[in-house]
Amino acid sequence: MRYPLIMPLVGPAALILGLTLLAVHPLLWLVGTWFDPAYDSYGVWVAALTVGLLLWSATSPLRIAHSRQRLSGLGLLALTAAVRLLGQRLGINVLGAVALAVDVYAIGLLLGLDRRARPLAPGWLAVLFAFALPIERILQRGFGFALQQLSATGACAFLNLGAPVRCEGIQLQWRGQTVLVDLPCSGTRGLLLLLLLFVALAALTRPTLGRACRGALLTLAAATLGNSLRIVALAVGLVHREALGGVDVLAEPWHSMIGLIALTLAALPLLLWARQGRSDAVPATPVNTGFDLSRLLSIKPFAGLAFLAACSGIVALPPQPLDVARPQPAPRLPGYIAVFAAQPGALTAQERDYFTRYGGGAARAAYGPYGLLVVSTTAPLRHLHAPEECLTGAGHAVRYLGQTGGPIPSAVYRSTDPQGRVWRVTVTYVSERGEWTTHVAEAVWRWLQAPGTTWRMIQRIAPWELPVEAAENFDVAVWRALDLPPLPSPTHPQPLPVKL
């Protein structure tokens, strides 16, 4: 006799369970990135801001009973499932986590945030939550090199207003000083912070499409100009250090203070844009604040169970990522480098599983006091990463020191392991076509122009207390032992890297 009472709940219960299945893995992965030092993510604060705005709006009374622009619930469910299916099939966790933003949009529509006395735009709120994903790493790896070039060009144009400057790519020679616009100065974090501010303001002001497009363009322009001004300020500080009383603009707190001032100046146009577009509508008389659950309760048992079965199939689907490298044997390291015999080191179980699943290969060995790690892959977008990512994940405190202009141009890091030992870590990326770079972002950029090209990461580790000359001699010996093409020697004084 109870079955007729239970049957209407089967459909909604199956639907909710299916949505939970789709959300569990992406949510666990996303929360893990917030607290993993390798990601250096501020996503937890973005998520807190999103929840705070949602509660701020949802606790105000409804002022409009019904909305004519509500998206179909089935459409949202299909979109969530499709995004999760794509992420699961391609083995890209970020895509699966994007579906969580769709869920935030659905929650915003269910709560009627756009119809309340303190209204919010559910779509913009969902975009705001998307900033909780580790998109800074994606932007830095995919577009960091282009942003670096853009920042150098802007800084060169500003410096030319005061005195002639010689610009060679990312290197600026101005008033007898050579300044290198290093990749961390690409302005990626500043751009993301300004975009975050723009999206939050858009959620509050609910702009029209045209006004939102103008605001987005304004944000990009402000971020570019702000970062160029920051680089100019650092360059001027380096040139006129004595006139400033010996202040080192690359040291704290001056470095961060200059960046904060530039970011504040870049944010002012956005605040003006939001103020001009603020809605002055007066809330109407509040109406019933109860939620309309009739659509949810109307889900038929068969439809709910079918959706649950589809969600179970999506979760169980084996991933087949597209950016898998060609199967390659592990690189063969030389038996001797200089006077040191090789002491092969084993990869961790996680590393072995990773290279088995996604192709490529890696090998490490110790040579006296030095360490060598070589990673070879045809998919640098997935395989190659900067030392601070893996070392930070292993408990090291890593600080990027800039780019050296020695016999083997390299990115240099200072790494302190959990036991307190300090190491000098240098890394260079070399392609089979003879290209080389000191940053992953440039390697990815060049690989996108010639997909399928094999890239190798050559990472060397030396005790910090060893002389720099000894480490550089080992680098030269590594290049000879691995039979790598010679890199061009610098024809200019070693540049002073302007870095975040």
Image: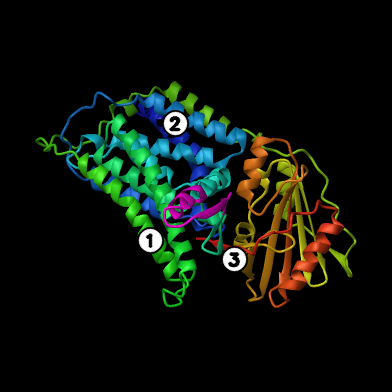
Q: Which residue is mark 1?
A: 260
Along the polypeptide, which appears first: circle 3 or circle 2? 2
Q: Is residue 276 left or right of residue 109?
A: left
Q: Residues within 10 Å of mark 2 (few under 14, many from 20)?
A: many
- Could you say which is closer to the camera, residue 177 or residue 436? 177
Q: Quadrant of the N terminus?
A: top left
Q: Amino acid at mark 1?
A: Leu
| Residue in the picture at 48% in, 62% down | 235
The image position of residue 245, as x and y in percent, is 42, 77
The image position of residue 309, as x and y in percent, is 53, 28
Q: Which residue is mark 2?
A: 14
**What segment carries the magenta color?**
152-171
Q: Nearer the viewer, mark 1 or mark 2?
A: 1
Q: Secondary structure at mark 1?
A: helix
Q: Quadrant of residue 19?
A: top left
In the rendered structure, are the residues bearing label 1 and label 3 in contact, judged by CB atoms less than 8 Å apart?
A: no
The image position of residue 152, as x and y in percent, is 51, 51
Along the polypeptide, which appears first: circle 1 or circle 3? 1
Q: Residues under labels 3 and 2: Cα distance?
A: 54 Å
Q: Which residue is mark 3?
A: 401
Numbered badge on residue 418: none
Q: Is residue 237 left or right of residue 63?
A: right
- Could you say which is closer to the camera, residue 436 or residue 35? 436
Magenta stretch encompasses residue 167: yes
The image position of residue 485, as x and y in percent, is 81, 51
Q: Is residue 29 visible?
A: no
